[in-house]
Amino acid sequence: MTSQSLRPAPRVLVVEDAEPVRGLIVRALVGDGCRVTEASTAAEARAVLSESKPQVVVLDLGLPDESGLDLLGEVITGGVPVVVLTSRGEERDRVLGLELGADEYMVKPFLPRELAIRVRRAATRAGLTPTPELGGGGLVIDRGTREVSMDGSTVAVTDREFDLLVHMASSPRRVFSRDDLLRDVWRSSPDWQSAATVTEHVHRLRAKLERDPVHPTLIVTVGRAGYRFEPRRPAGEPSQPLT
Ligand code: CA
């Protein structure tokens, strides 16, 4: 199982006429586990919308057949959250888009990863993709917002650290080899990338999350086999003996 498959897969309609840009958006969203339908004109988008109701629409405002703002109004009236993505950075468009009810507004050029996060956020806010929290014992891993907190304090983690943590925490006590983690979290293999990458990320997560990183109790080393996630117990309860 991969970290992506553990998360809900929102159905997203991408409306963008510029093919290279659309390709970039689609790759970012598919890579994040979304199910994507594409449209390059407002007319195509309407055809898709009449057949199926996507959970989020990513909408370019500069479409060849009409203004994306008209479509934006219709989609929002239909109750679907919209992430507006446009090259129009002017203040008035931004305000207009938000006034019409866009959930998110991104100006090109954009970071694909940021777009994927904003799409997830829009879906979660709309209550369409409930993401149960992982963790326990003071650790909260929120897959909707991709935020981690420990004992009530936010812990800043990178995207990769987050994916690694979610992957392991989703199967508590299961032992993952470094090769497993390279394959499932990095989408890589020992042929391409050194397993030391995994070790390095585990060390960083421990530094951020463990009460005593030198004697980890959360991400535990299991002999030479790899690592496992040990769910934290509420303070006061004895933890499992270390292996
Ligand atoms: Ca355009």
Image (cartoon, helix red, strand yellow):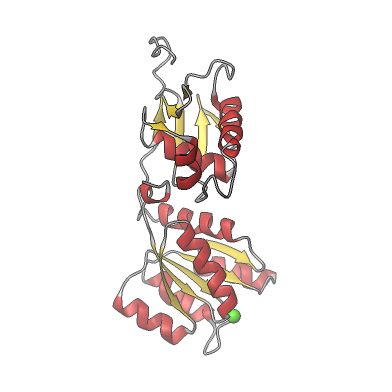
For the image, the number of numbered tags is 0
Question: Which residue is at the far right?
Answer: 90
Residue 174 left/right relative to 15: left
**Above or below, 151 relative to 36:** above
Let me know if residue 146 appears in the view: no
Name the residue: 66% across, 72% down: 92
Question: Which residue is at the far left?
Answer: 51
Name the residue: 42% across, 80% down: 45
**Residue 119: x %, y % from top left:** 48, 59
**Residue 88: x %, y % from top left:** 66, 74
Occupied quadrant, residue 215? top right
**Above or below, 145 relative to 141:** below
Question: Which residue is at the far front?
Answer: 191
Quadrant the C terminus occupies: top left
**Above or below, 237 relative to 138:** above
**Above or below, 206 relative to 65:** above
Let me know if residue 104 appears in the view: yes
Name the residue: 56% across, 37% down: 198
Residue 186 left/right relative to 79: right
Ligand 1 quadrant assignment = bottom right
From the viewer's side, name the closer residue of 205 and 75.
Answer: 205
Name the residue: 39% across, 18% down: 233
Occupied quadrant, residue 126? bottom left
**Residue 1: x %, y % from top left:** 36, 46
**Residue 62: x %, y % from top left:** 59, 81
